[in-house]
Image (cartoon, rainbow, N blue to C red):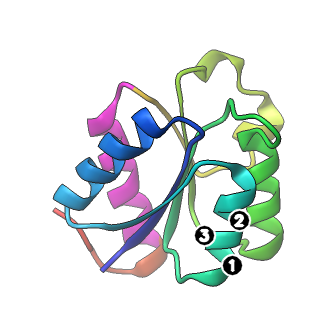
Amino acid sequence: MTRILCIDDNQDVLEPLGEMLRASGFTTLAALSGKQGIRLLLQNSVDLVVLDYEMPEMNGGLVAQAIRRCKPKIPIILFTGMLDDIPYSVRHNVDGLVHKTDFDGLLTSINTLTNVSLGTRKAT
């Protein structure tokens, strides 16, 4: 089963996101900060990361850089409400960019990226 690490500093986003992903057949891990997310990534088998951009301490761009250094092949989707404000350097370092209100788009991106990285379809 595909395991997705969700990183967002807002619990009100993490909870419904996790519920939606589990209802779609995924297992999830949740982190309320970039540092916590990186720790979970290093301690667990993860197939994909869904990452917020605007977070204290480490923004999503810095978290994506850290993920690329330690686990370069894991797909990263930036799931944010600030699509227009994401710098090119950050856009270039992630595999998908989805607005936080577009849950269908997020599921489509997850299914596409996990098919590519895992070679089989894991969720419906």
Q: Give the mark toward the camera: 2 or 3.
A: 2
In 3D space, how far apart are the residues under numbered discs 2 and 3 (Cα atoms)? 12 Å
Q: Is residue 83 left or right of residue 20?
A: right
- Which amino acid, mark 1? Leu
- The amino acid type, in three-letter code, at marker 3 is Ile
Instruction: Judge whether 31 appears above or below 81 on screen.
Output: below
Q: Nearer the viewer, mark 1 or mark 3?
A: 1
Is residue 100 found inside the magenta-colored segment of the image? no
Q: Tell me the residue that label 1 is attached to.
A: 42
Residue, x 76% and y 34% (percent of image)?
56
Image height check: is 99 above or below 58? Answer: above
User: Residue at left 74%, top 49%?
Assistant: 93
Question: Where are the magenta residues, as a range?
Answer: 101-116
> How far across and how far down the image is residue 96, in percent?
54, 45
Q: Position of residue 51 (x, y in %)?
A: 58, 47
Q: Position of residue 12 (x, y in %)?
A: 41, 33
**103 vs 26: above or below:** above
Q: Secondary structure at mark 2?
A: helix
Measured Cα–Cα span from mark 1 to mark 2: 6 Å
Q: Secondary structure at mark 1?
A: helix
Residue 110, magenta (yes or no): yes
The circle on residue 74 is 3
